[in-house]
Amino acid sequence: MIKIIDLYKSFGKHQVLRGVNLKIPAGKMTFIMGASGTGKSVLLKHIIGLISPDKGQILVDGKDITKLSERELMKVRKRFGMLFQEGALFDSMTVGENVAFPLKEHTKLSEKEIRARVELKLSQVGLLEAINKMPSELSGGMKKRVALARALALDPEIVLFDEPTTGLDPIMQESISYLIKETQERLNLTCVVISHDVPIAFAVADKIAFLYEGQVVEEGPPEKIKKSEHPFVKKFIRALPACFKEGHHEKE
Ligand SMILES: Nc1ncnc2c1ncn2[C@@H]1O[C@H](COP(=O)(O)OP(=O)(O)OP(=O)(O)O)[C@@H](O)[C@H]1O
C-alpha cells in the first residue's frame, strides 16, 4: 500500500501540488486522471522518489520514502517498475538488449539467466519473435509492449505508468490497456496509471483519483466516479458516449 499524505510541491512561484492525499491499494490498479498540466506526472515522480516534496509524506508499506538517503531509496526503487510517457527504448539496442538492460545494471545474473528472463518477459507481452529486431522496425504498439517487458524485467511489485497508450490508435490503446490489466492481475502488481482515457479507466481501474487544482477532489471505484457531483469530474467524463454513463440502460 502506498499512502500519500498532505503532499505539497511548488516550482518557483508555481504551486503544483497543494495538499494531495491518496491511498494506493496494493495489488490493484489505480488511475490518476485530470487536466493537462495539473501535476499528475509530478505526483508520479514523487512516488518513485525522483522529486522530493516541499512538505508531506509518501509511505510505501509504512516507510516514508521522502526521508530516505539516496542509498536506501535505491533499495526501495528496485521494487518499482516505471513506464514513462515516451516509453523511450534505446534505439541503438535490439529489443532483447533493451529488456536485458535493467537486468545487467541491477542484478548479478549470468548471461544465460538474463537471456532466459528476457525471453520470458518478451513472451509475456507476445513479442518473443521480435527479440533481435531494432526498435525502428517496430510499430508504436509493439514499442510500448517492449517498454512494458522492460519495466517488468526486474519483477517489480509496483509499476507506474505515465500515459502508457499516448500516440497509439484507439484499437492499439485498448489492446495495450488490457495487456497491462491482464499482467497486473496475473502478477498481482500494484499499478498506478496516469491516463486521460475515461472509457479505459472505467473498464480496467479498481480505483480512480481525480487531481484538480493541486488536490485529489474525487476518488473511488469507477461506479463512484460515474456518480460524482464534482463539477470538474462531471465535465471530464461528460464527453463520453451515453452507454458509459451512470443511469444509462440499453433498450430491452
Ligand atoms: N522540473 C520542473 N520544473 C519546473 N516546473 C515543472 C517541473 N516539472 C513539472 N513542472 C510543471 O508542473 C506542472 C505539472 O506538470 P505535470 O507534467 O505533472 O502535468 P500533467 O498533469 O502530468 O500533464 P499532462 O497530462 O499534460 O502530462 C506543469 O505546469 C509543469 O510545467
Image (cartoon, grey):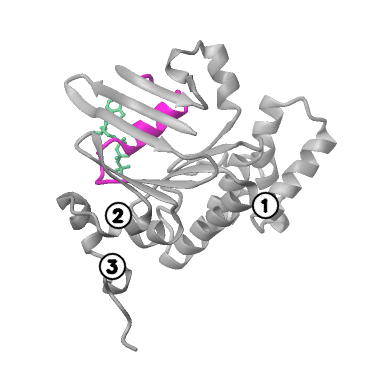
Disc 2 + disc 3, Cβ < 8 Å: no
Q: Quadrant of residue 78?
A: top right
Tag 2: Cα neighbours inside 10 Å, few (<14), some, or many (≥20)?
many
Disc 1 + disc 3, Cβ < 8 Å: no
Q: Mark 2 and mark 3: span between their CA atoms?
A: 10 Å
Tag 3: Cα neighbours inside 10 Å, few (<14), some, or many (≥20)?
some
Q: In the rendered structure, does residue 117 fall within the stretch colored magenta?
A: no
Residue at left offset 24%, top offset 29%: 16
User: What's the magenta region?
Assistant: 33-52
Q: In the rendered structure, does residue 47 fall within the stretch colored magenta?
A: yes
Q: Nearer the viewer, residue 223 or 102?
A: 223
Residue at left offset 57%, top offset 19%: 74
Whether residue 199 is visible: yes
Q: Quadrant of residue 179?
A: bottom right
Locate residue 133, reporting x and y percent. 67, 52
**Residue picked out by circle 1:** 133
Secondary structure of residue under mark 1:
loop
**Side (left or right) of 84 relative to 198:** right
Secondary structure of residue under mark 3:
loop
**Residue picked out by circle 2:** 225
Q: Which amino acid, by three-letter code, is at mark 1?
A: Lys
Q: Which amino acid, by three-letter code, is at mark 3?
A: Lys
Residue 245: mark in rendering: 3
Locate residue 125, reporting x and y percent. 64, 55
Of the two numbered discs 1 and 2 on the same chain, state the one appearing first in sequence: 1
